[in-house]
Image (cartoon, rainbow, N blue to C red):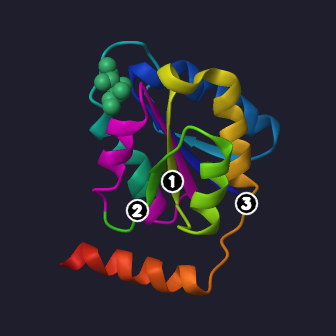
Amino acid sequence: MKIALACDHGGINLKTAIKKHLEKLDYEVLDFGVNSSESVDYPDYAAKAAKAVVDKEAECGILVCGTGIGIGIAANKIKGIRCATVGDTFSARMTKAHNNANMIALGERVIGIGLGIDIVDAYLNSSFEGGRHQTRIDKMMALESK
Ligand code: RB5
């Protein structure tokens, strides 16, 4: 399974730790940067990873910035993306189960490395429940063309 990863300078330590963790678990990682601590603009990196997800180069994506908020909002501007900013494992599981989120965004300065890795595992190890949730997702995605 291929996973797109991207971050800004505020998320580089957590993104690096997630990449190492995923590769150890034999996931294939598409790393869209950033790979230095120089200040960058998170929408540029959110867009790269989000496009890989909508183009089906990756099955899902994980984004990291300082708060997880800016990079998550930016990703949701790309048509077809459902990105949830999550700071706990329950939300990570639920956003896959109910929203079928194809990306999650994490805030390194908020959650740190240990919880960040647990959240990634919770998200990747959950499954979409379908049924009434698919109806709601269809309605949500229809809003993109309004
Ligand atoms: C960068 O300083 C910071 O604004 C960014 O990482 C993120 O927290 C924005 O939402």
Give how far across and how far down residue 17 sits, in percent.
Answer: 66, 25
- Give residue 50's position: percent from left, percent from top: 41, 53
Q: Nearer the viewer, residue 15 or 116?
A: 116
Labels 2 & 1 near each other (Cβ < 8 A): yes
Could you say which is closer to the camera, residue 78 or residue 136?
136
In the displayed structure, does residue 42 sit left or right of residue 135?
Answer: left
Taking the image in four quarters, ligand 1 sits in the one at: top left
Of circles 2 and 3, the one toward us is 3
Q: Residue at x 52, y 48 (%)?
A: 104
Residue highlighted by disc 2? 81
Q: Secondary structure at mark 1?
A: strand
Asked if ligand 1 lies within 8 A of label 1, the reply is no
* Residue lying at 38% horizontally and 45% vertically, measured from the top left: 72
Q: Dots 2 and 3: beta carbons under 8 Å?
A: no
Q: What amino acid is found at the position of numbered circle 1 in the picture?
A: Met
Residue 141 position within the rendered picture, expressed as x and y whole percent measured from the top left: 36, 76
Cβ of disc 3 within 8 Å of ligand 1? Answer: no
Q: Residue at x 56, y 29 (%)?
A: 15
Q: Secondary structure at mark 2?
A: loop
Q: Which residue is mark 3?
A: 126
Instruction: Give the mark nearest the N terminus, 1 or 3.
Output: 1
Using the rendered view, name the quadrant where residue 40 is placed: top left
The stretch of residues the image draws in magenta is 53-78
Q: Which mark is residue 103?
A: 1
- The answer to whether residue 21 shows anywhere in this view is yes
* Quarter of the image with the C terminus in it: bottom left
**What amino acid type is highlighted by mark number 3?**
Ser
Relative depth, front residue between 71 and 115: 115
Q: With respect to residue 129, does 32 lie above or below?
A: above
